[in-house]
Amino acid sequence: MKSEELNKKLRGFTTVLRLEFSVELPSGSCTLTLELTHSDVGGGDVLVVEFLDVASFSLKDFGGGLTQLLLLQVNDISYKQLDRTNYEIRELERDAISFVCRDFRVLSPDVQQANEA
């Protein structure tokens, strides 16, 4: 899946249900799993995305109730030829989360975009 395809899937999925950051030892490879929904009352479609080889992870003003990532954007930066870094992910509205990663995969089954439902 390309970054443009993931950006399309992310549209409307703003409410964070789960954010899990894990480190595989001894390699030190970091994985971020993000579970989002478009419903702030529950019961809606869920989008689960796993980001692989995460680095430069930054998180601010997160938690304490309903947490939303209002405009999550995935950019292909492979042209920069950085070691194990192909994508930059950033929440553009409030800069609540940002990181780079080598790859990503969507773990949830096909879900409708929230603005189409």
Image (cartoon, rainbow, N blue to C red):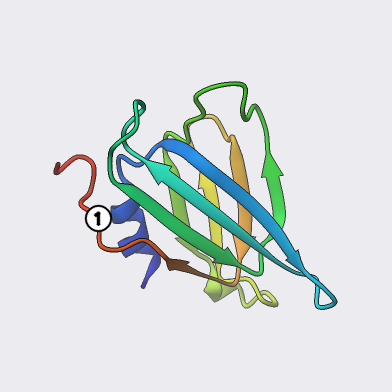
Residue lying furthest front:
43
Give the residue at x 63% y 71%.
Answer: 85
Relative height, residue 116 to residue 56 (above, below): above
Residue 98 x %, y %: 61, 47
**Image height check: is 26 above or below 61?**
below
Q: Quadrant of residue 65?
A: top right
The extreme top residue here reads 65
Give x and y (percent) for residue 90. Answer: 54, 47
Task: Tell me: residue 73, above or below residue 54.
Answer: above
Q: Provide residue 86's location: percent of width, then percent of height.
A: 56, 71
Q: Name the residue rendered at 61%, 65% in the picture.
A: 101
User: Whole-percent x and y of residue 27?
Assistant: 80, 78
Disc 1 crowd rating (10 Å Cα; few below 14, some 14-19, many 20+) is few
Query: Total marks drawn?
Result: 1
Q: Nearer the viewer, residue 19 or 96?
A: 19
Residue sitting at x 14%, y 41%: 117
Secondary element under disc 1, as helix, strand or loop, is: loop
Horizontal side, residue 27 vs residue 97: left or right: right
Q: Is residue 10 left or right of residue 115?
A: right
Q: Mark 1 sits on what residue?
A: 111
Q: Quadrant of the N terminus?
A: bottom left
Is 35 or 103 nearer to us in this picture? Answer: 35
Query: Which residue occupies the extreme right position in the image?
Result: 26
The residue shown at (66%, 76%) is 84
Q: Amino acid at mark 1?
A: Val
